[in-house]
Amino acid sequence: MAATDLTARRVTLARAGAALLACLAGWASLPAFAQAEAYPSRPIRLVVPFEAGGTSDTTARMVAQQLDQALGVRVLVDNRAGANGAIGAAAVAKAAGDGYTLLHTTPAFVINPHVSKTAGYDVFKDFVPITNVGLGTGYIVVIAPQIPARTLREFIDWGRASRKGVAFSSPGIGNALHLATEMFVARTGMQTVHVPFKGTAPALNAVASSEVDLMILPPTIAHPMVQAGKVRAIGFTGAERSPDFPQVPTMKEGGLDNFVIVGTWLGWFAPAGTPAAVVDRLAQEIRKIVAQPDVRAAFAKAGFAVDGRPPAEFAQFVRSESQRFGELLKTVKIE
């Protein structure tokens, strides 16, 4: 073989070897790339730690339905009610941090560990905040229909004069509705008895049947009962009147100054260890969903302003909420 032919053959083989090495290097990087791109590759379970049909459940389903389309996989809502949301939260805390089990919850999430040492989870060690989908605009104050009071001031006067005190209901001990009512009665000086129920619906039914006298709850849940005349709405805790109850005065208008409670929030969390890329992807998709006009309108009807803040900002919010509720629980002496 001529020297020139041998040299050309060596150059060709060298080039082929370099190409092969480059190809192998590319293949070596494929698993990590493919893994990042593969999420999600199977259905996602969204745990709602409250009963089906409530505000937290309906808002979760609104977002989940849209997230189906955005991610290309089913997002299945799993209601795990009980213990003021602690049962569902504890189940998610034990799940794998792979982005396939998520939690949609309320302030009960940060309240429970303050109330019970056996809540079953640690807000900051067991979870990664994703985003907050909605912020409440206020609560409605309703009373039993047989009470001889038509306004907030008349009810306060009636409650103060009552020898047996005022009985109020809530969906459990230590949740946001319970705390809002405790704040209300503390401001008014009424003697009260708390009657907890397993859920918002039975707690409201207790007011309608005059088993208890008072309840504070989200406007959207109270609306059918108020419209039917089964309970009487006397005040709204938001800064402005509720669109659902334009005829109901704010607490300030009703004679109770400096009493504004904007209500609950609706946060999404993932188990600890969930990759940051997955958390960011979920947060970005959810932010797009809640920005849609039809979703905004649906949330407004449910008594919420849409949010969608990024994970880092939501994490700061959760920490401040935990501190705020912890201090409030000490003030109203709930343990």
Image (cartoon, rainbow, N blue to C red):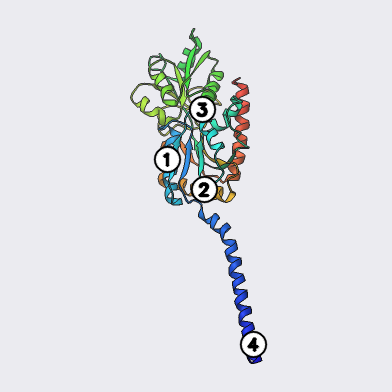
Q: Which is more toward the observer, 241 or 140?
A: 140
Q: Which residue is drawn at 48% across and 8% down?
A: 164
Q: Where is residue 330 in the image (x, y as percent from the top left)?
A: 63, 23
Residue that numbered label 1 is attached to:
61
Residue that numbered label 4 is attached to:
6
Residue that numbered label 2 is attached to:
282
How many numbered marks are there?
A: 4
Q: Where is residue 47 in the image (x, y as percent from the top left)?
A: 48, 37
Q: Which is more toward the observer, 271 or 19?
A: 19
User: Does 52 sit above or below residue 179?
Assistant: below
Q: What residue type is labelled 1?
A: Arg
Q: Which of marks 1 and 3 is nearer the N terminus?
A: 1
Q: Which of marks 1 and 4 is nearer the N terminus?
A: 4
The crowd level at tag 4 (other Cα within 10 Å; few <14, some 14-19, many 20+) is few
> What whole-number distance in Å separates the C-alpha atoms at marks 1 and 4?
71 Å
Name the residue at the bottom extreme: 2
Asked if marks 4 and 2 touch (Cβ < 8 Å), the reply is no
